[in-house]
Image (cartoon, rainbow, N blue to C red):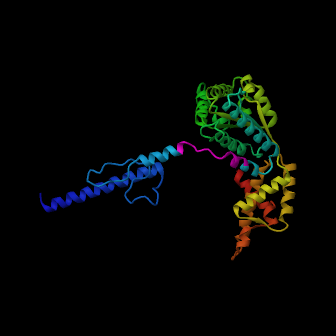
């Protein structure tokens, strides 16, 4: 074999090695994202098994360390319960809800201690009904409850799966049970949060929602040691929902009522949003904001509490951007400040909303 032939074969082998490495790297990045910056130049992405190098060179590190990382992610380390309680107490308003959650935490802790001392304990039903108007913090507290239950050792993962009627009910016979079971399976180890749950039982006995309820009840029974279900909606409708089925009534015996936020609380929520996003109200703008919040909460049924405050904030920063766009030079102070003018709705806002609805 000539030197020229040997050189060609060597170059071909080199090209094959590079193509192999690049292909492995692309596949790995698709699965796990880009490799860490401190990884070796030719190492495969974390978690990718080592590929034997047929040309005598190592193509990367072995997989055991990566497998350990995957195992660590799947163990879902528990958060400190005191830190979670501090987070709960940092929320604006929700005084009654905070007290109820604190009481539930204490009950679970004492029940666990009684078991450790071989004392009789009552089986606790930890499924809950959250009732109140939109924007009162129901989803936020449900997410925190999943973490609290995990911290207390009740749930193995502590995640939250949020669905509504459309996430449980299908349009064909037999499909609803499958769809509901999939949602239950996805929530195992955590909390299944069903928003506007009353929609499952308000459309008549022939509706597929009844099938969803029956499948849900079976899932709650089959997985009672590692699943918590929280249903949420308007007060009267949620009471009707629970009373519509004996199985629901026996499993949901914890009710948390979420009252509307007061004007002072909504004002505090707006200012908190400003602080987190790097904005501030100019002197005197707080009075304008208070007036707007009072008018909206009294006259606008669909205002939505904290959700309405978020909309006001987003509209205010959009108006500020339109106002500042006319200036050639802007200071840091100007970029941070929301004025009373930014808070007030104007005719062009109504025109923009009308365009969006068309």
| Depicted 85 relative to depicted 216: above or below | below
- Residue 161 in view (yes/no): no
- From the image, which quarter does the N terminus lie in? bottom left
Q: Nearer the viewer, residue 79 or 244?
A: 79
State the image quarter where residue 281 is shown: bottom right
Drawn side of residue 295 relative to residue 181, left or right? right
| Depicted 277 relative to depicted 113: above or below | below
| Number of residue marks | 0
Residue farthest toward the bottom in the current orientation of the protein: 329
Which residues fall within the magenta stretch? 73-85
Residue farthest toward the left in the current orientation of the protein: 1
Q: Nearer the viewer, residue 258 or 356?
A: 258
Task: Please tell me which residue is depicted at 34% across the width and 48% down the height of the picture.
Answer: 51
Q: Position of residue 180 (x, y in %)?
A: 62, 31
Q: Position of residue 68 (x, y in %)?
A: 47, 46
Q: Position of residue 277 (x, y in %)?
A: 70, 61
Does the stretch in magenta take in 229?
Answer: no
| Depicted 107 relative to depicted 65: above or below | above
Does the stretch in magenta take in 78?
Answer: yes
């Amino acid at each position: 074999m000539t030197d020229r032939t040997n050189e060609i074969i060597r170059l071909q082998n080199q090209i094959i090695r590079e193509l192999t490495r690049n292909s492995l790297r692309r596949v790995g990045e698709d699965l796990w994202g880009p490799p860490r910056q401190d990884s070796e130049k030719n190492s495969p992405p974390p978690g990718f098994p080592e590929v034997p190098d047929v040309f005598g060179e190592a193509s990367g590190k072995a997989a055991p360390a990566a497998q350990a990382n995957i195992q660590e992610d799947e163990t879902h380390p528990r958060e400190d319960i005191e830190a979670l309680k501090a987070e709960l107490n940092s929320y604006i308003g929700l005084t009654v809800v905070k007290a109820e959650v604190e009481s539930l935490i204490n009950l679970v802790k004492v029940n666990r201690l009684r078991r450790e001392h071989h004392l009789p304990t009552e089986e606790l039903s930890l499924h809950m009904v959250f009732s109140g108007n939109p924007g009162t913090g129901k989803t936020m507290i449900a997410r925190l409850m999943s973490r609290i239950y995990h911290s207390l050792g009740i749930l193995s993962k502590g995640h939250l799966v949020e669905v509504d009627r459309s996430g449980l009910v299908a349009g064909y016979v037999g499909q609803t049970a499958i769809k509901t079971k999939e949602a239950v399976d996805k929530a195992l180890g955590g909390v299944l949060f069903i928003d506007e749950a009353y929609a499952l039982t308000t459309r008549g006995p022939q509706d597929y929602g009844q099938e969803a309820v029956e499948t849900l009840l079976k899932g709650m029974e089959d997985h009672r040691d590692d699943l918590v279900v929280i249903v949420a909606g308007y007060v009267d409708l949620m009471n009707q929902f629970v009373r519509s089925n004996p199985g629901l009534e026996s499993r949901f015996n914890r009710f948390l009522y979420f009252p509307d936020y007061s004007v002072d609380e909504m004002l505090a929520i707006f200012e908190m949003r400003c602080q987190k996003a790097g904005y501030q109200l100019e002197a005197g703008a707080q009075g304008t904001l208070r007036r707007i919040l009072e008018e909206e909460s009294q006259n606008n049924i669909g205002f939505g509490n904290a959700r309405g405050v978020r909309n006001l904030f987003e509209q205010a920063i959009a108006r500020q951007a339109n106002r500042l766009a006319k200036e050639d030079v802007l200071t840091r102070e100007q970029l941070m400040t929301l004025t009373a003018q930014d808070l007030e709705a104007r005719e062009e806002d109504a025109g923009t909303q009308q365009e969006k609805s068309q």
